[in-house]
Image (cartoon, helix red, strand yellow):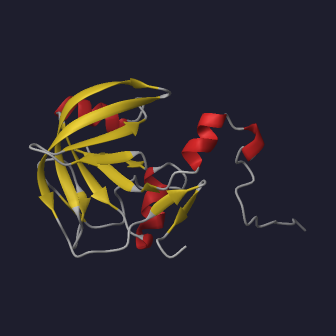
Amino acid sequence: MVSVTIHSTDPFATPDEEKSPVRRLRGRLAAPVTLWTAAGPAGLTVSSTLVADGDPGRVLGLIDDESDFWAAAERSGRFAVVTLTPADRQLADRFAGLMPAPGGLFAGDDWADTAYGPVPAGARTWAGCRLESSRVAGWALLVEAVIETVEAGPPADPLIHYRGRYRTLGG
């Protein structure tokens, strides 16, 4: 008989005391969970996202420069940024590479094609972005883009990443 143990925490996570001070600081900052997609299709869960209001507005994010998303976004020069809600936890995990994706990342869900990349079908908030620049920042790639269009769906609580876990505004 095989014994299976279910953990309430990630057994592979680095213990807090073994993390660098910068990583511990970053973990103490709540971050919105977003999905970045590009034609290809390719996508990536990104929790290091910042929107700068202005004329034009901009989006900045820290992404994995070795990701399929970055190759597709760099090739097309465009991408979509989708805000995620607590109902999107599995979607976020799938595009973060934390959950199996039989048939590919985009299989099993309805997607709407846009000029910027696919976005989940239905009432969502998303932005269509034109890539402007990128540079290495720490162990990530800092991407800056001009926001060309915004589709604002109904207000919804955001999915938040804090201390290595998804959270909601209520806790």
| Above or below, comparing residue 96 to residue 145 in the picture | below
The residue shown at (63%, 43%) is 24
Quadrant position of the C terminus in the picture: bottom right
Q: Residue 104, percent across and down?
A: 40, 52
Q: Left or right: where does residue 50 sit relative to residue 103?
A: left
The residue shown at (21%, 37%) is 145
| Above or below, comparing residue 23 to residue 6 in the picture | above
The residue shown at (36%, 63%) is 84
Number of numbered discs present? 0
Which quadrant of the view contains residue 88? bottom left
Q: Residue 139, percent across and down?
A: 50, 28
| Above or below, comparing residue 138 to residue 103 in the picture | above
Q: Residue 99, percent across and down?
A: 54, 56
Quadrant position of the N terminus in the picture: bottom right
**Foreground pick, 152 / 101:** 152
Instruction: Name, please, the residue furthest toward the top.
Output: 136
Which quadrant of the view contains residue 21? top right
**Foreground pick, 75 / 62:** 62
From where the camera sits, is residue 120 visible? Answer: yes
Q: Left or right: where does residue 132 sit relative to residue 60?
A: left
From where the camera sits, is residue 43 visible? Answer: no
Q: Left or right: where does residue 11 sit relative to residue 95?
A: right
Q: Residue 69, percent across and down?
A: 33, 39
The residue shown at (60%, 54%) is 163
